[in-house]
Amino acid sequence: MITTGSPIGRCCNQCLGNRAWFAFRQRNAFQTLLGGVVLGLAISGMHYTGMYATSYYPISMSINIGVPLLSQTVLALSVAAATLAICSIYLFLFSSMLIRES
């Protein structure tokens, strides 16, 4: 059992306090943009590391999957529309936040 009096408990409390300070402190637009770039690079790095570590081997038996529910064009347009919607919502919220700051 980890208590707040133990060294591990004190370390956990310190880390949680630092995390709360970092999460709830005031940031300017540059710091937010820089954080987004760092997060994007981290996600991209994890993705490519996982893809590099993945191995695909052919199988001897054939599997009949059937007809896809969506064509490639419809799927691509759906993903593009969802991405545009999410980015538009974020841009609207971010720009309103910048207007309130000034």
Image: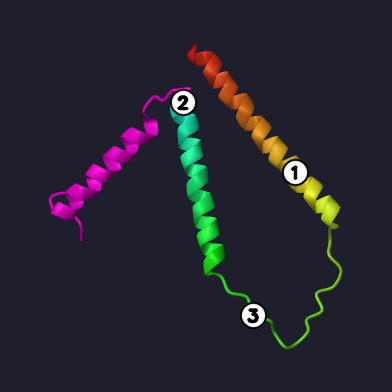
Question: Callout 2: helix, strand or loop?
Answer: helix
Along the viewing direction, whichever of 16 and 28 lies nearer the viewer:
28
For the residues bearing labels 3 and 1, Cβ distance under 8 angstroms = no
Specify whether residue 90 is painted magenta: no
The three-letter amino acid code for the residue at tag 1 is Ala
Q: What's under tag 3, amino acid-wise?
A: Tyr
Which residue is more in the foreground, 74 or 1? 74
Q: Which mark is residue 30?
A: 2
The CA distance from mark 2 to mark 1 is 27 Å
> Vertically, is 67 above or below 92?
below
Kindly identify which residue carries mark 3: 57
Which percent across, then down, holds residue 36?
50, 37
Q: Is residue 20 found inside the magenta-colored segment of the image? A: yes
Q: Is residue 76 above or below residue 55?
A: above
Distance CA(mark 2)–CA(mark 3): 45 Å
Mark 2 neighbour density, 10 Å: few (under 14) some (14–19) many (20 or more)? few
| Crowdedness near tag 3: few (<14), some (14–19) or many (≥20) residues, C-alpha within 10 Å | few
In the image: residue 74, left or right of residue 57: right
Within 10 Å of disc 1 (Cα), the crowding (few <14, some 14-19, many 20+) is few
Q: Earlier in the sequence, mark 2 or mark 1?
A: 2
Q: Secondary structure at mark 3?
A: loop
Looking at the image, tell me whether mark 2 or mark 3 is earlier in sequence order. Answer: 2
Question: How many numbered discs?
Answer: 3
Boundaries of the magenta span? 1-30
- Residue type, mark 2 in image: Phe
Residue labelled with disc 1: 80
* Residue that protrudes farthest toward the front in the picture: 52
For the residues labelled 3 and 1, the Cα–Cα distance comes to: 31 Å
Direction from residue 26 to residue 65 in the image, left or right: right
From this view, report whether residue 51 is shown above or below residue 4: below
- Work out which residue is located at the far bottom of the displayed protein and give it: 60
